[in-house]
Image: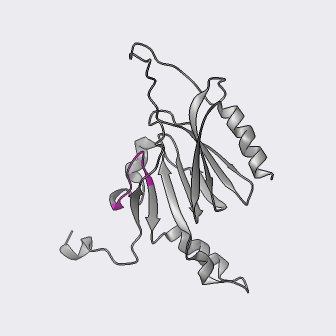
Amino acid sequence: MGLFDKIKTKTDEFARVIEWTPQWDTGAPMPQVFSNGHKIFLIYLINEPDPNCDDTYVTMIDNSSETTCPLALVEFSGHTFRFGIANNEVFSGLPLWDKGLEGYAAHIIENSTWINELKNINKVHPYYNEERWKDRKHFALLFHDEIFEVIATDYKIETFKTTFGQLATEVAKRMNK
């Protein structure tokens, strides 16, 4: 590879790691996504070590468990998302892996080809307005077994000590307000 092959242009797509608090559990974050076409919600298990754990046992939970856990609820201001895609064993095969993407991290994808694709689709609309796309960001969160990507203008995160089922019920209420 020559010197000029490594030079990025202003239009090259790349990932930029962003601060994300609270961080998800790296082993089994169990993310869940809810959407109604107007709002997108993401639930995940927070990485919060048990202060009483002496590493001689493991507490197994799943999203159907009645165990109360530290959970994050993220509400995105957007309505387009992708979920699943790849797990940690194949992250290195992702197109942006050598362009800033990191496992178990949150990112903004700069110069997003996905946003450009959506803009091109929407340009045929008679009232298309380029300004409406100005504040949209492509977020990518790499979990252990899934990747969550969303096009949104913003997000807010709340934390709860509850079960996945109880928080899912809360999400359903919020989606139908």
- Left or right of 155? Residue 98 is left
Q: Measured from the top left, where is residue 156 in percent x and y? A: 58, 54
Q: Measured from the top left, where is residue 153 in percent x and y? A: 58, 66
Residue beneath the point at 44% across and 17% down: 52
Q: In this view, does 75 lie above or below 73?
A: below
Residue beneath the point at 80% across and 51% down: 176
Q: Magenta region's main secondary structure?
A: loop
Residue in the foreground of this view, choosing between 13 and 52: 52
Q: Residue furthest right?
A: 177
Q: What stretch is highlighted in magenta?
A: 99-106
Name the quadrant containing residue 10.
bottom left
Q: Measured from the top left, where is residue 8 in percent x and y? A: 31, 74
User: Does the magenta portion include 110?
Assistant: no
Name the quadrant containing residue 119.
bottom right
User: Does the magenta portion include 104?
Assistant: yes
Residue beneath the point at 38% across and 17% down: 55
Q: Measured from the top left, where is residue 80 in percent x and y? A: 64, 61
Name the quadrant containing residue 120.
bottom right
